[in-house]
Image: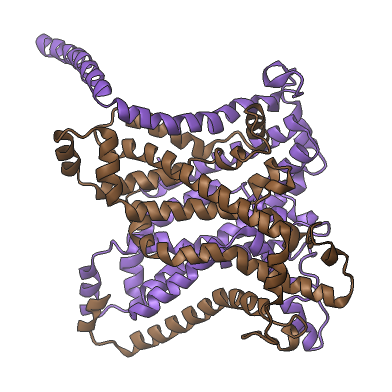
């Protein structure tokens, strides 16, 4: 018994030394591998980790003269100012509304579309519609917003010319706070739904054909096959995509929102990312803007963490 | 699904197929029509575009929109700048991503775990707008070509996709035998791994390239010199802010209706011209989507 314990204690010790030797030999044999790795590491240090150090200005009153290190500490002042600020409630609500609305539509639609694609039996038709559905993903946001203007503009807009052609009155979609979330979310669907099917199509391509054949021979209906074979097979992919999407709940993209904003729809279109830009780069309140950005990042991470925990609890698929 | 031929479809199956195909056809038309509209409108006499509710072919065919766009100095400079930033930036992207993905794909690479964590953290935490701006300021690259190329050199997501592709497609025995033959790690990458990886390289080039070409944000934040603006920033002025810049004074001053209409055609034309490079590249790369992305997606 005692010998066994001694053995147990002694073994890892030898292992450790040996492992270190092996590792040393590996390093010298494969120096090139580490030199290669150094390049992405340096890029990541400079443009990802160095800015993280800069986050401390959220707790300071940054002034260029003193630099990040030398600027005076202010504690949580920047945060309390944001929480008590006039715009706080409105911005959080706008961000959440657009994002939750977006999630509710953009998570299920690509799944449904991928299932429908999967049921097409005419091969050329399937590949044609898939190829077409990917195209909008490659169009730039500037052009997407330009196209929203072409279609929904008051002057020379397609929809409004049809309305007036039939004797109706032109509607100012672009300047309407009520229309903004719909325009934002559905233009995103137009652009992204096809591309969103790709990951599910990939997962479906891994389903063994004989499962489908067996189900057919047993006389299962198409809906039964979708429910009992296809959906269970892509479930892990669905869960992972949903977790990742929910993790971005407070991250309404800057690019499109900023372009779609105008003076009249600001009451629904001002979100955290555009606010960070305006107070930061436009007004030059570096510390305050960084505090708002940090708050956004932390809330996102908490959401991701909670959803991931929930997924672990309910099923066995999770991010980590 | 080819093997379904052994099965005789029931009536339920036929109904299902008809409904499914009908819905997908409508969906495809909704995706396509806005694009068709812009193409046709760019070739039409602007006064006639709205004569009918649905524009399906050019009305009063004209190339005036295109010829005017090609005379606009801002657009031409922007196009040139965008080509430069996209090409140089994508090259940097591909090099940095490959150099990270290849060691991480090797089973024997010591330190794989910690290094992967080091990269993954940056997917969830970032410094944010101002701290990143301050870094670029410190580096002295504001308002230079470097700020358009160096930041964003690595997308961790793409690197993981590429790593997974290498793992799944490069047989270990091949690496081992090349190693026994005396090849070093760099030669392995160059002579064995890369020649076997055309699909993933094509897909990565497309992702990064389109991202660079379509980006207006970086330029808006970091560039102040008009002569350095890429096309997307010029497009933003034209399409979103509705101005044609100061080089085409005749246009910006033209208040009469005819000028207004010409501006409208130019908007349609400039959309087509700016999307053309991406669309020309798309069919070339499209056939690699499946091989490139799907392998990465399944295992990743």
Residue B28 appears left or right of A142: left
Picture residue at 44% right of the left edge, 52% below the top:
B205
* Residue A261 position within the rendered picture, expressed as x and y whole percent measured from the top left: 75, 56
Question: For residue B160, which quarter of the picture?
Answer: top left
Picture residue at 63% right of the left edge, 32% below the top:
B136
Picture residue at 51% right of the left edge, 28% below the top:
A45
Q: Nearer the viewer, residue A313 or B120?
A: B120
Colour mode of the rendering = by chain
Chain identifier of the brown chain: B
Q: Nearer the viewer, residue B213 or B131?
A: B213
* Residue A18 position within the rendered picture, expressed as x and y whole percent measured from the top left: 19, 16
Q: Quadrant of the N terminus of chain B?
A: bottom left
Chain identifier of the purple chain: A
A191 versus B155 height, above or below: below
* Residue A302 position within the rendered picture, expressed as x and y whole percent measured from the top left: 55, 39
Q: Nearer the viewer, residue A220 or B240?
A: B240
Question: Taking the image as drawn, is residue B11 in sight?
Answer: yes
Question: Taking the image as drawn, is residue B155 in sight?
Answer: no
Residue A236 appears left or right of B82: left
């Amino acid at each position: 018994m005692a010998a066994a314990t001694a053995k147990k204690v002694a073994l890892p010790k030898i292992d450790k030394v040996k492992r270190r030797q092996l590792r040393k030999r590996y390093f010298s044999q494969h120096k090139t591998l580490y030199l290669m790795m150094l390049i992405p590491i340096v890029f990541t240090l400079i443009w990802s980790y160095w800015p993280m150090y800069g986050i401390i200005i959220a707790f300071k009153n940054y002034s260029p003269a003193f630099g990040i290190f030398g600027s005076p500490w202010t504690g949580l002042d920047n945060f309390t100012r944001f929480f008590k600020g006039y715009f706080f409630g409105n911005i959080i609500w706008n961000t959440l509304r657009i994002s939750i609305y977006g999630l509710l539509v953009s998570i299920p639609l690509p799944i449904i579309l991928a299932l429908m694609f999967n049921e097409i039996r005419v091969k050329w038709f399937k590949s044609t519609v898939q190829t077409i559905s990917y195209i909008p993903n490659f169009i730039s946001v500037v052009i997407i917003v330009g196209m929203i203007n072409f279609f929904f503009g008051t002057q020379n807009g397609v929809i409004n010319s049809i309305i007036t052609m039939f004797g109706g009155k032109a509607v100012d979609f672009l300047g309407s706070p009520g229309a903004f979330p719909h325009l934002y979310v559905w233009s995103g669907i137009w652009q992204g739904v096809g591309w969103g099917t790709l990951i599910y199509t990939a997962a479906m391509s891994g389903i063994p054909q004989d499962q489908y054949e067996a189900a057919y021979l047993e006389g299962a209906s198409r809906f039964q096959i979708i429910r009992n074979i296809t959906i269970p097979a892509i479930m892990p992919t669905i869960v992972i995509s949903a977790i990742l999407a929910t993790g971005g709940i407070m991250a309404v993209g800057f690019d499109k929102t900023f372009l779609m904003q105008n003076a009249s729809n600001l009451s629904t279109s001002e979100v955290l990312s555009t606010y960070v830009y305006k107070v930061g780069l436009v007004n030059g309140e570096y510390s305050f803007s960084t505090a708002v950005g940090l708050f956004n990042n932390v809330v996102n991470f908490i959401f991701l963490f909670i959803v991931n925990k929930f997924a672990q609890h309910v099923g066995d698929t999770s991010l980590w | 699904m080819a093997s379904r031929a052994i099965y005789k479809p029931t009536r339920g199956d036929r109904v299902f197929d008809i409904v499914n195909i009908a819905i997908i056809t409508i969906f495809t038309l909704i995706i396509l029509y806005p694009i068709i509209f812009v193409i046709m409108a760019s070739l039409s006499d602007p006064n006639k575009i709205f004569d009918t509710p649905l524009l399906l072919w050019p009305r009063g065919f004209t190339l005036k929109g295109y010829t005017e766009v090609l005379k606009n100095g801002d657009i031409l400079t922007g196009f040139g700048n965008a080509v430069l930033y996209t090409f140089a930036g994508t090259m940097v992207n591909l090099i940095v991503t490959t150099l990270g993905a290849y060691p991480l794909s090797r089973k024997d690479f010591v330190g794989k775990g910690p290094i992967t964590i080091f990269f993954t953290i940056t997917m969830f935490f970032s410094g944010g707008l101002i701290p990143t701006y301050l870094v670029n300021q410190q580096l002295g690259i504001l308002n230079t070509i470097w700020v358009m190329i160096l930041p964003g050199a690595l997308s961790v997501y793409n690197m993981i996709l590429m790593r997974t592709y290498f793992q799944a497609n490069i047989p270990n025995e091949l690496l081992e035998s090349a190693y026994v033959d005396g090849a070093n790690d760099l030669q392995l990458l160059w002579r064995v791994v890369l020649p076997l990886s055309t699909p993933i390289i094509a897909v990565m080039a497309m992702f990064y390239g389109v991202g660079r070409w379509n980006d207006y944000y970086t330029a808006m934040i970091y560039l102040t010199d008009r002569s350095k603006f890429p096309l997307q920033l010029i497009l933003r002025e034209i399409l979103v802010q509705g101005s044609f810049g100061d080089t085409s004074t005749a246009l910006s001053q033209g208040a009469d209706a005819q000028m207004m209409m010409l501006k409208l055609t130019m908007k349609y034309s400039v959309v087509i011209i700016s999307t053309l490079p991406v669309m020309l590249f798309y069919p070339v790369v499209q056939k690699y989507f499946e091989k490139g992305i799907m392998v990465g997606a399944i295992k990743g």
